[in-house]
Amino acid sequence: MPEGSIALDVWGRAAEAGSRKYRFERGDVLFGKIRPYFHKVVVAPVDGICSTDAIVIRPRRPDLFGMTVGTVSSVPFVAHAVQTSQGTKMPRANWGVLERYAVPEPPQQLLARFNDYMVDFVSLIHSLVATSRSLRATRDLLLPRLISGEVDVSELDIDVGELVS
């Protein structure tokens, strides 16, 4: 999981997650509980499974999605996770403690507006992640063929404009 970003753009296979796993759904918040000071908090772009070294957080109601993402990825929440973590060499956040983190609930109209904003924001992030992964896969497929000469683009009329200068 990336540090300080809610965008997850790299993931592996189930076998790489070790023996114990948690199931998560697209839109769940995943909180890296080992060494919480690394601030590893993402919103899942796909359904999947993860190691038990991540806490899977799902809002109790759909209208609390934005508030959940905003709270769990906030610096104060992560700081609270760090302060209450257990262990010295590899401190671990404790969900039993974190779930009691006090969050004031704003008026319904404000909550709804914020939730709509966050749903759109996270949807855009997930769309950009999918595009980036697709472009990366295309590059990885084409680049070796271009370098080896298997694919010839010398006859294509490609306008590179300002890229050449």
Image: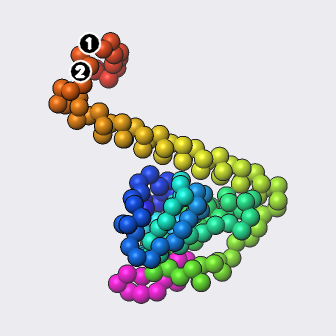
Q: Secondary structure at mark 2?
A: loop
Question: In the rendered structure, which segment of residues is drawn in magenta?
Answer: 80-91
Colour scheme: rainbow
Residue at which label 1 appears: 155
Image vertical order of residue 141 relative to residue 60, above or below: above
User: Is residue 128 found left or right of 139 in the rendered image?
Assistant: right
Q: Please indicate whether residue 139 sits to the left or right of residue 132 in the image.
A: left
Residue 136, image quadrant: top left
Q: Position of residue 25 (x, y in %)?
A: 58, 61
Question: Mainly helix, strand or loop, the magenta region?
Answer: loop
Which residue appears at 26% of the width and 34% of the height?
A: 143
Q: Is residue 76 visible?
A: no
Look at mark 2 in the image and give the residue it sits on. 152
Amino acid type, callout 2: Asp
Front-most of residues 58 and 35: 58
Q: Are marks 2 and 1 in contact (CB under 8 Å)?
A: yes
Seen at 82% across and 61% down, the residue is: 107
Of 107 and 100, the residue lying toward us: 100
